[in-house]
Structure formats: structure tokens, C-alpha cells
Image (tube, rainbow, N blue to C red):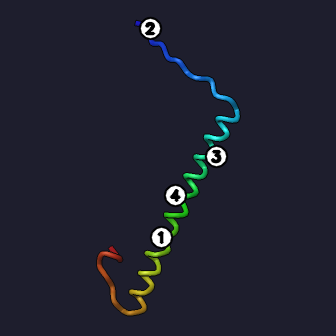
Amino acid sequence: MEATTTYKRRTREEIMAWLQRARERKDAFQKRANEIFAEEERLRQQAAESHYYDIAVTA
């Protein structure tokens, strides 16, 4: 049996728009990851300054 696939040809503009949306999603994900990391660092620093160490934070 012959496999048939049909692909819709995309214009350069469609491809560039798709890539731009992918970059925006990546940037939004990276920004959120950086915020989470900064919050965790802040909590670690706060715990170290208060001489309280939470096993869940340091593990």
C-alpha cells in the first residue's frame, strides 16, 4: 500500500509568524522559570539568615 501524505505549502510569512510565536512562548517560559528560581533563592537566603534550614528547601 502506498503511503500518501499531503502537506500544505506554507508561505515565508506564515513560517516567520510561527517562529515568532515559538520565541514568545519560549521567552515567557524562561521569564517564569527565572521568577521561580529567584523566589527559591530568596527563600534559601532568608532561611540562611534566620539560621533555619528546611530540609525540603535544601534537599
Residue drawn at point x = 36 percent, y = 92 percent: 51
Q: Nearer the viewer, mark 4 or mark 1?
A: 4
Label 3 to label 1, Cα distance in Å?
Answer: 25 Å
Whichever of callouts 4 and 1 sits on the residue coming sooner in the sequence is 4
**Left or right, 27 with reference to 43:** right
Classify mark 3: helix, strand or loop.
helix
| Residue pointed to by mark 1 | 37
Q: Quadrant of residue 12?
A: top right
Q: Quadrant of the N terminus?
A: top left
Circle 1 Cα neighbour tier, 10 Å, few/some/many (<14 / 14–19 / ≥20): few
Whichever of callouts 3 and 1 sits on the residue coming sooner in the sequence is 3
| Residue pointed to by mark 3 | 20
Of residue 43 and residue 51, the one placed in the foreground of this image is 43
- In the picture as drawn, the residue positioned furthest to the right comes out as 12
Classify mark 2: helix, strand or loop.
loop
Q: The disc labelled 1 sits on which kind of residue? A: Phe
Q: The disc labelled 4 sits on which kind of residue? A: Phe
Label 3 to label 2, Cα distance in Å?
Answer: 36 Å
Whichever of callouts 3 and 4 sits on the residue coming sooner in the sequence is 3
Label 3 to label 4, Cα distance in Å?
Answer: 14 Å
Whichever of callouts 2 and 1 sits on the residue coming sooner in the sequence is 2
**In this picture, is 34 found above or below 16?**
below
| Residue pointed to by mark 4 | 29
Q: Quadrant of the C terminus?
A: bottom left
**In this picture, is 34 found above or below 17?**
below
| Residue pointed to by mark 2 | 2
CB under 8 Å between callouts 4 and 1?
Answer: no
Circle 4 Cα neighbour tier, 10 Å, few/some/many (<14 / 14–19 / ≥20): few
Q: The disc labelled 2 sits on which kind of residue? A: Glu
